[in-house]
Amino acid sequence: MEALSILAQDAAAVADFGPIGAGIGYGLAAIGPGIGIGYIVGKSVEAMARQPESAGMVRTTMFLGVAFTEAIALIGFVVAMLVQ
């Protein structure tokens, strides 16, 4: 019984930091997609510079990759808001 009261006090203390925790959680969730988008765009520019005739196909594929990677960041944002 004493363990439950200790857990309840810890949960109340953590609830006070909900918005801060959500901000930190989303910040950490945005690091991966940020790195991923930078990598995708960098490699796409490199591919377009090497083969300019295929720039249209590379650009289309790049935008799809950026959209899917950005979806991960949006999911992290939604989870951070739901936890709060």
Image (cartoon, helix red, strand yellow):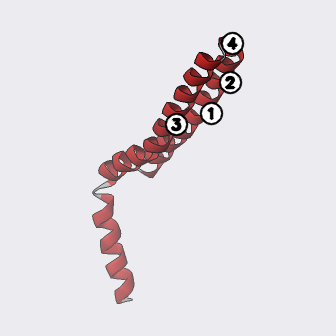
Local secondary structure at mark 3: helix
Callout 4 environment at 10 Å: few (<14), some (14 to 19), or many (20+)? few
Above or below 15: residue 26: above
> Total label count?
4
Give the residue type that dot 1 points to: Phe
- Circle 4 — which element? helix
Reading the chain from its start, which is encountered first: label 1 or label 4? 4
Disc 1, SS: helix
- 42 or 28: nearer the viewer: 42
- Mark 2 vs mark 1: in front: 2
Q: What residue did someone put label 2 on?
A: 61
**Marked residue nearer the N-terminal end (4 or 2):** 4
Q: Earlier in the sequence, mark 2 or mark 1?
A: 2
Which tag is nearer the camera, tag 3 or tag 1?
1
Q: CA distance from mark 4 to mark 3?
A: 27 Å
- Horizontally, is 29 left or right of 14 in the view? right
- In the rendered structure, the answer to whether residue 59 lies left or right of residue 17 reads right
| Residue named by callout 3 | 74
Kindly identify the residue that appears in the image at 56 percent across and 24 percent down. 46
Reading the chain from its start, which is encountered first: label 3 or label 1?
Answer: 1
Q: CA distance from mark 2 to mark 1?
A: 11 Å
**Type of the residue with mark 2:** Thr
> Residue type at mark 4?
Gly
Q: Nearer the viewer, mark 1 or mark 4?
A: 4
Q: Tell me what residue is drawn at x 69 percent, y 12 percent.
A: 56
Contact, mark 3 vs mark 1 (Cβ under 8 Å): no
Q: Which residue is mark 1?
A: 68
Residue 49 vs 14, above or below: the answer is above
Q: Which mark is residue 56?
A: 4
Evaluate if marks 4 and 2 touch, with contact meaning CB atoms under 8 Å apart: no
Question: Which sits earlier in the primary sequence, circle 4 or circle 3?
Answer: 4
